[in-house]
Amino acid sequence: MTDLSAFSEDELDQLFHVPRQVVWAAQLVESEGIIGMAKELYAGGKVFVEAEQHSNALVRGLAARTPKGEAIGGQDADAAIADALAKAPAAIALLRSKGTEDDVHAYSQWVLEIATKVSDSAKGVSGAEQEFINKLTEAIKG
């Protein structure tokens, strides 16, 4: 497992951005009302807290990071989804260049877990949410 010190601050921000963006995108895929939105945001936060106990040190370290000036949100659903899908492959490529295959696998699984748990938290995974998860899976596979 690769230590976070192998990455620059900009690279760590890039790796940290994708999971946060996936929470936001998964929440926006389909409107679940105010209570559904609260459940989805809670589920996203819970996945981060749980990941602080992850078996992979890189995922643990990323989950414990504090956001620095980067705002997530304010995008419409299409832009949020496009951002998550566009930046996920770059994060995986970065991990492949500096990390281990274990890191790549653990990070990929964590990002997909985020999308699945957020999507499932309000009313179960809808067709549109499953489509997002499928596209994210493909984006991660490259």
Image (cartoon, grey):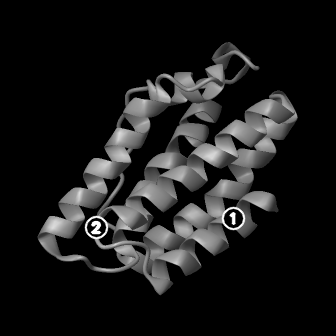
**Residue 71 seen in render:** no
**Residue 106 seen in render:** yes
Asked if residue 37 is positioned above or below residue 30 in the image, the reply reads above
Q: Amino acid at mark 2?
A: Ala
Q: Regarding mark 1 in the picture, which secondary structure is present there? A: helix
Q: Nearer the viewer, residue 85 or 130?
A: 130
Q: Amino acid at mark 1?
A: Thr
How would you rate the neighbour count of disc 2 (Cα within 10 Å): few for under 14, some for 14-19, many for 20 or more?
many
Which quarter of the rendered picture does the C terminus lie within?
A: bottom right
Which quarter of the rendered picture does the N terminus lie within?
A: top right
Residue shown at the point (46%, 74%) measured from the top left: 79
Identify the mark nearer the N-term, 1 or 2.
2
Asked if residue 90 is positioned above or below residue 80 in the image, the reply reads above
Which mark, residue 137? Answer: 1
Q: Left or right: 138 with respect to 33? A: right
Q: Left or right: 42 with respect to 26? A: left
Residue shown at the point (59%, 41%) measured from the top left: 14
Q: Nearer the viewer, residue 88 or 126?
A: 126
Q: Position of residue 53 (x, y in %)?
A: 49, 22
Residue shown at the point (33%, 61%) measured from the top left: 121
How many circles with numbers are drawn on the protein?
A: 2
Q: Going by the picture, which residue comes out furthest to the left?
A: 34
Q: Examine the image and state in which quarter residue 61 appears.
A: top right
**Residue highlighted by disc 2:** 122
How would you rate the neighbour count of disc 1 (Cα within 10 Å): few for under 14, some for 14-19, many for 20 or more?
some
Q: Position of residue 33 (x, y in %)?
A: 17, 76
Q: Marks 1/2: CA distance?
A: 21 Å
> Which circle, 1 or 2, is nearer the viewer?
2
